[in-house]
Image (cartoon, rainbow, N blue to C red):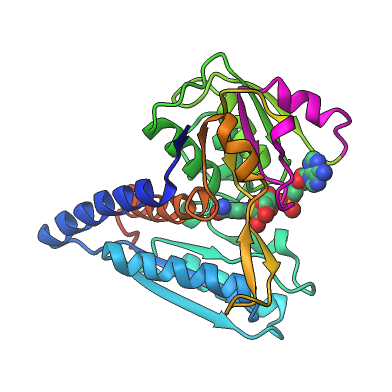
């Protein structure tokens, strides 16, 4: 069994990006600038945004954190989005999800200029991704593809089962795995909450990407020998014995499944760090593609 070490690979990617930033600096160019918008004070969201901002510092990017109160109206948030779209100093930005219930998430994501949409959530970018055109691929599926590629995991001709059909993970990774190209050419089954024979499908899978958010959902008796397992799940499970009061758990029963797997991602330290590295990569691409607009 080989561990797909997202922590190590993400550090390699960050080193590559940092070297690129150094070169930009030595040429006297402006470095990439990522902004992050967060509305409210959800603990997990604050942790994610904090990690993203720290990662920017680590590679030499500029970063700006816009933290707005929970009471922010949709109109106020849209105003900030318009200002970020117009700001020539900002190469890309993200609006951390979920947003408070009184704000229409889709409306906000649609307002992000596609050229600055480093999360790849805008329909124009999602559509380009589906058509295999150059775009921003959402950081989590992009990270999974990168991890598979860097470990030389064969996907061509394999049967991949993706569990979960969300717009940010399941659906895009199912499209990418089936495309022509690196870490593609797989035959993909996209499973979801209405799938009736999931254990049977999983037992036929050469590759399983689990993105449903149910701790230890995928058990040893649901996988075949030699399976490649990508665990996207991140669930905070309450645990009073820990200082933080919780621990992070993936979708996969790692203890049971890993002895049967040829490759497997750990949680934490698998897909999570890759997601952040690919967000940085998209920001660098935004800087390079648009040359800083204005
Ligand atoms: P979501 O909650 O939007 O969707 C879950 C999907 O799982 C749905 O499509 C649903 O149909 C499917 N599902 C639910 N129960 C099922 C069942 N019993 N059988 C089959 N399918 C079932 O999910 P999301 O936003 O894609 O997130 C999924 C998980 O991945 C969460 O734990 C989330 O925290 C994590 N996540 C991790 C990263 C990362 O960087 N590692 C990024 C995004 C999301």
Q: Residue furthest top?
A: 157
Rendered position, 257 above or below 187: below
User: Exactly how many numbered labels are in the figure?
Assistant: 0
**Quadrant of the image occupied by residue 22:** bottom left
Q: Residue at x 49, y 52 (%)?
A: 275
Q: Residue at x 60, y 51 (%)?
A: 121
Question: What residue is shown at x 68% (from left), y 72% (from top)?
Answer: 239
Above/below status of 106 relative to 222: below
Direction from residue 199 to residue 76 in the image, left or right: left
Q: Which sits in the foreground, 39 or 217? A: 217
- The answer to whether residue 77 of the structure is visible from this angle is yes
Location of residue 196 in the rendering, given as x and y in whole percent from the top left corner: 89, 30
Q: Is residue 101 above or below residue 261?
A: below
Is residue 285 shown above or below 112? above
Picture quadrant where residue 43 is located: bottom right
| Image quadrant containing the C terminus | bottom left
Q: Residue, x 60% and y 75% (percent of image)? A: 242
- Residue 54 image position (x, y, % from top left): 38, 70
| Residue 79 seen in the current view | no
What is the magenta range? 194-221
Residue 220 counted in the magenta span = yes
Q: Is residue 205 found inside the magenta-colored segment of the image?
A: yes
Q: Nearer the viewer, residue 241 or 272?
A: 241
Can you tell which quarter of the image residue 31 is in? bottom left
**Residue 193: image location, x then y, percent:** 84, 41
Q: Is residue 60 left or right of residue 130?
A: left
Counting from the top left corner in percent of width and height, residue 145 is at 48, 35
């Amino acid at each position: 069994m080989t561990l797909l070490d997202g922590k190590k690979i993400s550090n390699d990617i960050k080193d590559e990006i940092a070297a690129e930033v150094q070169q930009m600096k030595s040429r006297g160019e402006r470095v990439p600038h990522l902004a992050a918008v967060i509305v409210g004070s959800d603990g997990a969201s604050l942790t994610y945004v904090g990690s993203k901002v720290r990662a920017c510092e680590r590679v030499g990017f500029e970063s700006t954190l816009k933290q707005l109160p929970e009471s922010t109206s949709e109109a106020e948030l849209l105003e900030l989005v318009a200002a970020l779209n117009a700001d020539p100093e900002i190469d890309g930005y993200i609006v951390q999800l979920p947003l408070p219930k009184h704000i229409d998430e889709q409306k906000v994501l649609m307002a992000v200029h596609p050229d600055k949409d480093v999360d790849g959530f805008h329909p124009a970018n999602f559509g380009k991704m589906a058509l295999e055109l150059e775009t921003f691929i959402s950081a989590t599926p992009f990270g999974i593809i990168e991890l598979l590629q860097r470990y030389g995991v064969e996907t061509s001709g394999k049967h991949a089962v993706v569990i979960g059909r969300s717009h940010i993970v399941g659906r895009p990774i199912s499209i990418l795995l089936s495309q022509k190209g690196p870490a593609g050419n797989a035959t993909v089954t996209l499973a979801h909450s209405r799938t009736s024979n999931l254990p049977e499908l999983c037992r036929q899978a050469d590759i399983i990407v689990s993105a449903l958010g149910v701790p230890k959902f995928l058990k040893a008796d649901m996988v075949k020998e030699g399976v490649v397992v990508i665990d996207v799940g991140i669930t905070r499970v309450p645990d009073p014995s820990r200082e933080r009061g919780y621990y992070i758990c993936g979708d996969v029963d790692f203890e049971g499944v890993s002895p049967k797997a040829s490759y497997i991602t750990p949680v934490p330290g698998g897909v999570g760090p890759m997601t952040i590295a690919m967000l940085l990569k998209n920001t660098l691409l935004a800087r390079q593609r648009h040359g800083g607009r204005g």
